[in-house]
Image (cartoon, grey):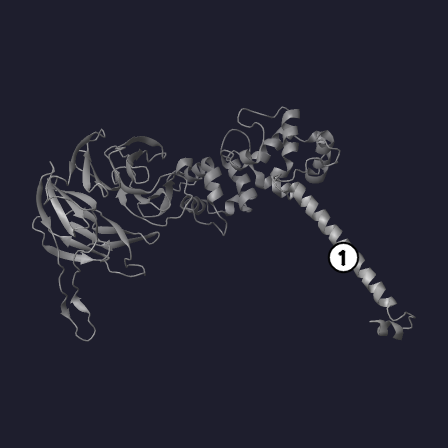
Amino acid sequence: MSQHLQKQGCNTGPHHGARIIHFANGLVVQAITGIFLLLLLAWMQLAGAGPFDRSDLNHDNSVDSLDLEIFSYQYLDQDWETVNWCQFYRSSIQNEKNFRRLTSDRIERYLELLNYIALSYNCQTADLQSLSTESILQSADKSDLSNDQVVDLADLVIFSTNYLETYWEAVDWCLFYENTLAGLDYEGQRTRYFLKHFGQLLSFINEYFYCGGEEPPPTALLLENTPKFLARIADAPYFTGDYYITDPKIGSLFIYDASLVLKAEIKGLNKPLGVAVDSRGYILVGNNGRDNIEVYDPANGDLVTVFAEGLVKMPTAITLDSLGNIYVTDSLSNSVQVFDSAYNQLRVIGKSSARGALHFPTDTEIVANMEVFVADQVNNRIQVYDLDGKWLRSITFDGTPGENCSWMTGVCEIPGAPPFTRLQALETDSFGRLHVLDNFGAKVLIFNPADGSFLGSYGEYGLEAGFLRVPMDVLVSDSGTAIVTSGDGDRIEVYAVP
């Protein structure tokens, strides 16, 4: 470097230029270090203190009318004395997205100023008291955007402009409504926020445009999770027409409509397994984590009552008979516990004799209102009892060979059926036939319940649509379709029953 400087006519000694460079480099390093320390200090002052409040716009350490005046000219382009500050205050709470559009900033950064407005102009009401970040994020329904105490077309126009950013007549409102209830995006925009905060407006859309859809679910039923392990399924054909499926991994009961579209969720369960719907339409859920049976109201997701506490250990499945009696398949106690419709214990099935003993039962089915069939998983058999719990007989199955099989391809015209390997669920159809779901065999086998003769099968192991991998339960409708839940995720397979 010194040679280069000498060529330019600079008379430096052999080390003088190096000293200058080192000195300059030192100044640069000190400057950078100083800037870094200042930034670090500023960050330390802000860290953990929540969003930085910018309400003190004139930096005089107080939030007052001067800050309000600056805010008005800077963001509202209006004389501060002509602004309806209470209206601005309420609209800011109810539509923080519009507030951000005005200020290009989050509403949490102006909480002090909004509190000053509320106090100075006496804007606070019973439902709008002191502001906080939590109260803003968890505020109630925002549908009344025009603040006239009525949710109508005026609110829809404001909503369309502020949230969908389009003219309201250009929106397919029924499609928007259906997508929002189903948790689907609309025009590339997520809709979960709308379902949570605009329930009244969604109801208005449904009625005004004759969409014919269902009402938005109550807050307690809002869909928040995605299924990970769909286990037991129950339906309510004479009530809501919905399907209820437990998910022990998520800890929720997922609710599907009649078309098997996921629409709602009862949350806060602890490893829910068995599920059934009683004669009043209430949902009975076997809560494995809390060792009880919990009863929920499907209309709002409220807990109605709890029973069988201290009596059940692992309520794997729940079945009801025509009298309303409740059969709880308790896998860990190796029994089926029976309760009446008032939740009083009547008897215990499966421990009466050596021949009738159960070993990890997984499901119970009442056949012809006369006999109790129990999937005896470890023993690879189906045990049959009368309604009083007296053992009658057992059904076993060694499998069947395929018929008319090609020696070259191994494909059979009539496929064979595997023997019982891991019985998981039982179900009867409208013809009185018994459907037996085998978890390891990934197949549903059909039997004559009277003599145990094999009648046919459906389902096959595979990862693609139409196949089974970890089947957990089967429900056969009166229309002749079988719905099979698959525990490897959120898969539901629907088959035409042979």
Q: Is residue 228 above or below residue 253?
A: below
Q: List x then y, in percent, for residue 29.
A: 76, 57
Q: Residue at image x 45%, y 46%?
A: 176
Q: Residue at image x 34%, y 34%?
A: 299
Residue 6 visible somewhere in the drawing: yes
Q: Residue at image x 19%, y 42%?
A: 334
Q: Secondary structure at mark 1?
A: helix
User: In this rendering, would 123 be left or right of 303?
Assistant: right
Q: Nearer the viewer, residue 461 or 98?
A: 461
Count the marks.
Answer: 1
Q: Nearer the viewer, residue 263 or 270?
A: 270
Q: Which residue is mark 1?
A: 29
Q: List x then y, in percent, for residue 127.
A: 53, 27
Three-letter code, disc 1: Val
Q: Is residue 416 above or below residue 90?
A: below
**Residue lying furthest front:** 15
